[in-house]
Amino acid sequence: MSRAAGRVIPPSSNTAGYTLIEMFVTVAALVIVLGLMVSLARYLRNRSGEVMTRAVLVRLDELMARYLSDQQAFPPVPSVHGADEYALQRSALANNQAFAAALKRSGGVESPFSDIPVSLYDGQTVRDSWGRPIVFVPPGVAAVGILPQNRYFFYSAGPDRKY
């Protein structure tokens, strides 16, 4: 009820609040929209990580081709092996640091990694978008779960972070 100039005006009979069902429908719609936004954000994050890692792998391939033409040999790198995930992670890190140091030494005055984002190259290690070291495999060498190839290649652990 409200007062206007000393008179009492009764409330209108057609004013009603929200029903419980209307509130549940609104909350359900908001939850669905929020769920779609979260799943889309996760997809976009993974996709951008894949694109960025692919670009880094292509750049490393270019740098290795230049190194090979200058040095006429592949950089000496330890092979990647391990009985468990921790040993595999250690050997992948040693491999990564060895090839990154060799490529950096052959770069001359300018750093060959200058166009790789700082989040993926910290001065010693080249990582993929998920934080794992990228591994260099020379030709004819078997890697974990990968048969020997006739050409050198780089590989990333990927979004599941397992080699």
Image: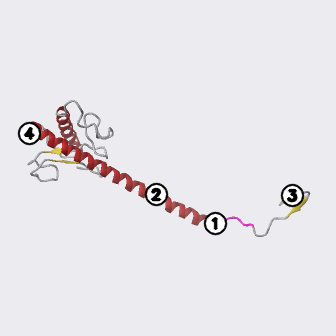
Name the one closer to the observer, 127 or 113.
113
- What label does residue 3 carry, if any? 3
User: Which amino acid, mark 2?
Assistant: Met
Closer to the chain start, of discs 4 and 3, is: 3
Label 4 residue SS: loop
- Mark-to-mark CA distance, 4 and 2: 49 Å
Q: Residues within 10 Å of mark 3 (few under 14, many from 20)?
A: few
Mark 4 and mark 2 lie on one chain; the one further toward the N terminus is: 2
User: Which is closer to the viewer, label 1 or label 3?
Assistant: 3
Q: Tell me if label 1 and label 4 are in contact, CB under 8 Å.
A: no
Q: Which stretch is magenta?
A: 15-20
Task: Provide residue 144's location: percent of width, then percent of height.
Answer: 16, 50
The answer to whether mark 4 and mark 2 are in CB contact below 8 A is no
Q: Say which amino acid is labelled 4.
A: Ala
Question: Residue 20: which numbered mark, if any?
Answer: 1
Residue 73's tag is 4
* Residue 88 appears in the picture as rendered: no
